[in-house]
């Protein structure tokens, strides 16, 4: 029992394959109708959000129901950086991460005194508080329901220092040293950050710190009986997780410089929980899968209307078509959440480990199929495991 | 451990091969895309189709309006393609629309759900622009959404024909070169409503505002406050309420003891249905304050809301952009074809969306091209008639339409389930016009990168 279960792929290979898959998304997602910059950016950004969330939920088992607050704070910080300092994205990302980290430190300090359902409720309360602050009380900073937007008359101190003459006639766009951060460049920027985040997440999972967090998950009391103070570990994990969320929030602002309070609503917090559970809690790749799946549903399924359905099922005879299209219409368009709900139920009931568990089962099934043909080898194989 | 094989070479090979095939296959399209960039975004070129993006709320507090808007858009597309009875195509003048598509291209559409949220609205607009390749985005039933989508469209170089948006900001502080609004605004509501309020309720009143907390609510409160205070009214208090609050009782209770004798509800959609119903249930309208009957005013009224609020709307005053009971040819033609298609008369949201689609199509015909800067120039300063509001003018300086404004009252004795609003007064266009400079803001450039 001394050797831990070795993963099938070693980490570097995993990272390599992951990078390739992410960077080539514009090509292989084409047949799914998802290869357009805005959705690709969302895949990458919510992937980061879910990775960060998984560091908390997957490693420590603490279910935070208020992660959207950090996402929102990251967005607001980034937009303010665009308004006050410069349209360059690096300071925006930096401030987004820092402010989210600071908020996470405060909320974490207060919430981590409790565990289980009490922790969830506390984080939910803090997030809802932040939402209401952003929505009404802090309107001068957040612009309330209308959302914080750029304006031509913003100061942008750094930009003004380096550029001479009149500002351009239109609104400036976000850039990275001259490269405009919308469309595909924006996606590649987010994708590279996602890969870096994925790498960080692997390192955390494999580190002694990660093991300590896993220890907390399996039995926090026992950890404490050994004389170890678990609070600092929890606090650190919470802050890291909050910073990931802030990073995702600032990237949302980078690709589209607008921040609205609805990003902080409890539904947004719930969404990241769904993403992580759907993909597979505590797995490296699961949260990203879940994030992509949910964003795909939200953007593609919601856009199907009856005309699209009629085209898709045009091979059916007229009479069948009249029944099928209205029936299917319930599950697409504005009913996309119904489909998502059903899928979520199926996953939770039959694959508690999320989609990753599903893939593992398929993978094992294929391998065992191969072995049945080989006959001799598999018995040894069984014994050695 | 020797039993763990390296993942088969075949898989890696497959990945590699797949990646290379993908790259090679998409290379031509990649270069062609760049070649088109010098042109304009989503140029339909040789395809026989013109695609429009209908971005309406299908969920959230304004979903009823969104559903009706979508019906109107579909009807407009039918009429543009020469299907159905042609609707306002027959009454709209001057018009170059023939009912054979636009510039020889068949009109098609993509739809999106704004969820009445700025974020979601921008995401679905982006999807339609980037994936579906729409040439024009239209819709929205909230000014917050309209302002957000309008600025996105400016960045993307896509024309935005605003649907139902009533905030002064849409064509004021936040106006954009690529955004156009046919609907009226809060300033016009105030200007039209004030004389009627003066006549009905006198010049010595104390008003209490409940206001939806976003751009539309803020500007409507400001406009109504300004025009009622000009009458000599006093504003007791203004309270902001969150959008989609559902329960307004905590905001209505303080009104009872505030000494106010008029409650002004700057709410819309389901919010207005809830707040008005609750205000009536609390007995506000049966009260006597300062020796006068307590009154409730809803500055922006729509038939869909009246339907939702039931008996509570009887006798309530407000303004509306259009009502199906109007007797001019344009309105009649539209009501007839809408009723034939969907079995109910259109709402004012439907009318403005329908008109906007026709106006855009006509501007393309007039320009002879889909190139946005040329289309914009055709719309700017365009004078037209036959769309249901009498002679109408698209002002070039702020892209706001000017037309007569209707002051309506909730019908005491409706003759049908749709006959809910009675037109009290048609305020002539001259009375609601204003100097475009008062709201600030700037349109921005014609040509965007």
Image (cartoon, coloured by chain):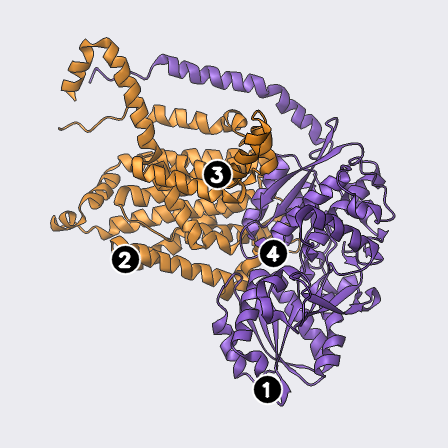
Callout 2: chain:
A
The colour assigned to chain A within the rendered structure: orange
* Mark number displayed over residue B288: 1
Q: Could you say where residue B258 lies in the image, as x and y percent from the top left?
A: 54, 83
Chain of the residue on which disc 1 is drawn: B
Query: Do the numbered discs 3 and 1 sit on residues whose CB atoms are within 8 Å?
Result: no
Image location (x, y in percent) of residue B5 = 27, 15
Q: Look at the picture and state if A352 lies above or below B398.
A: above
Of badges 4 and 1, nearer the viewer stands: 1
User: What SS does tag 1 mark?
Assistant: strand
Which disc is residue A297 wearing? 3
Tell me the shade of chain B: purple
Residue under disc 4 on the same chain as residue under disc 2: no
Residue A171 located left or right of residue A42: right
Label 4 to label 2: alpha-carbon separation? 36 Å
Q: Residue at x 60, y 20 (%)?
A: B27
Residue under label 4, please give it: B144
Helix, strand or loop under label 3: helix
| Residue at horizontal 34 percent and vertical 55 percent from the top | A105
Q: Is B190 situated left or right of B62 in this image?
A: right
- The CA distance from mark 2 to mark 1 is 50 Å
């Amino acid at each position: 029992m001394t050797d831990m279960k070795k993963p099938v792929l070693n980490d570097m290979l995993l990272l390599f394959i992951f990078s390739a898959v992410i960077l080539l998304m514009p090509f292989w997602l084409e047949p799914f109708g998802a290869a357009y910059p805005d959705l690709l950016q969302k895949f990458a950004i919510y992937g980061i959000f879910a990775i960060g969330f998984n560091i908390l939920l997957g490693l420590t088992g603490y279910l935070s129901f208020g992660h959207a607050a950090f996402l929102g704070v990251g967005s607001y910080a980034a937009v303010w950086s665009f308004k006050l300092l410069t349209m360059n994205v690096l300071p925006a990302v930096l401030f987004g991460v820092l402010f989210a980290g600071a908020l996470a430190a405060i909320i974490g300090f207060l919430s981590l005194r409790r565990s289980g359902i009490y922790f969830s409720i506390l984080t939910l309360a803090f997030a809802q508080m932040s939402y209401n602050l952003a929505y009404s009380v802090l309107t001068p900073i957040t612009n309330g329901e209308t959302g914080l937007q750029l304006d031509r008359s913003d100061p942008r101190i750094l930009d003004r220092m380096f550029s001479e003459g009149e500002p351009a006639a239109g609104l400036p766009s976000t850039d990275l040293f001259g490269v405009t951060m919308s469309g595909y460049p924006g996606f590649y920027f987010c994708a590279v950050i996602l890969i870096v985040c994925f790498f960080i997440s692997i390192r955390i999972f494999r580190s002694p710190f990660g093991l300590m967090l896993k220890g907390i998950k399996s039995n926090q009391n026992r950890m404490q009986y050994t004389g170890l103070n678990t609070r600092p570990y929890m606090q650190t994990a919470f802050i890291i997780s909050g910073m990931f969320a802030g990073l995702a929030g600032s990237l949302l602002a980078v690709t589209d410089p607008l921040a609205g309070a609805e990003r902080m609503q409890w539904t947004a917090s719930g969404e990241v929980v769904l993403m992580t559970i759907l993909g597979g809690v505590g797995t490296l790749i699961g949260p990203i899968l879940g994030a992509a799946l949910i964003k795909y549903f939200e953007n593609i399924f919601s856009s199907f209307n009856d005309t699209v359905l009629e085209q898709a099922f045009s091979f059916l005879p007229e009479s069948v078509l009249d029944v099928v299209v209205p029936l299917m219409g319930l599950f697409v368009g504005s009913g996309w959440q119904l489909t998502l709900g059903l899928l979520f139920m199926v996953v939770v009931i039959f694959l508690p480990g999320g989609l990753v568990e599903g893939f593992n089962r398929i993978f094992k099934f294929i391998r065992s199929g191969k072995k049945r043909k080989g006959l001799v080898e598999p018995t040894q194989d069984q014994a050695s495991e | 451990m020797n039993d763990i094989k390296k993942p088969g070479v075949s898989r890696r090979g497959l990945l590699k091969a797949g990646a290379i095939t993908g790259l090679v296959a998409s290379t031509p399209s990649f270069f062609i895309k760049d070649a088109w960039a010098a042109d304009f975004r989503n140029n339909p070129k040789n395809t026989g189709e013109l695609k429009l993006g209908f971005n309406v709320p299908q969920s959230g507090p304004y979903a009823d309006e969104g559903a009706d808007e979508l019906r109107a858009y579909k009807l407009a597309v039918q009429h543009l393609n020469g299907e159905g009875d042609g609707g306002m195509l027959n009454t709209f003048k001057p018009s170059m629309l023939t009912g054979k598509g636009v510039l020889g291209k068949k009109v098609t559409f993509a739809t999106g759900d704004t969820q009445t949220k700025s974020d979601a609205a921008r995401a679905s607009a982006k999807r339609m622009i980037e994936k579906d390749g729409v040439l024009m985005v239209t819709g929205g039933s909230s000014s917050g959404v309209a302002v957000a989508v309008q600025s996105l469209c400016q960045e993307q170089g896509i024309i935005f024909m605003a649907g139902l948006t009533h905030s002064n900001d849409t064509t004021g502080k936040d106006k954009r070169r690529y955004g156009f609004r046919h609907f009226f605004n809060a300033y016009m509501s105030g200007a039209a409503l004030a004389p009627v309020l003066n006549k009905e309720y006198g010049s010595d009143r104390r008003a209490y505002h409940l206001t939806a907390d976003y751009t539309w609510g803020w500007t409507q409160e400001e406009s109504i406050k300004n025009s009622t205070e000009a009458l000599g009214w006093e504003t007791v208090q203004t309270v902001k309420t969150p959008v989609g609050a559902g329960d307004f009782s905590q905001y209505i209770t303080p009104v009872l003891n505030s000494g106010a004798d008029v409650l002004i509800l700057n709410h819309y959609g389901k919010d207005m249905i809830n707040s008005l119903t609750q205000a009536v249930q609390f007995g506000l309208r049966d009260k006597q304050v300062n020796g006068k009957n307590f009154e409730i005013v809803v500055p922006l009224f729509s038939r869909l809301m009246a339907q939702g609020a039931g008996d509570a709307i009887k006798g309530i005053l407000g303004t509306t952009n259009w009502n199906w009971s109007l007797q001019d040819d344009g309105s009649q033609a539209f009501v007839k074809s809408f009723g034939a298609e969907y079995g109910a008369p259109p709402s004012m949201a439907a009318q403005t969306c329908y008109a906007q689609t026709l106006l855009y199509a006509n501007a393309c015909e007039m320009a002879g091209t889909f190139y946005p800067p040329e289309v914009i120039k055709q719309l700017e300063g365009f004078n037209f008639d036959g769309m249901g509001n009498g002679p109408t003018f698209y002002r070039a300086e702020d892209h706001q339409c000017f037309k007569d404004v209707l002051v309506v009252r909730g019908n005491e004795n409706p003759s049908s389930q749709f006959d809910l609003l009675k037109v009290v007064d048609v305020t002539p266009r001259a009375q609601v016009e204003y100097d475009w400079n008062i709201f600030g803001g700037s349109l921005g450039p014609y040509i965007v990168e």
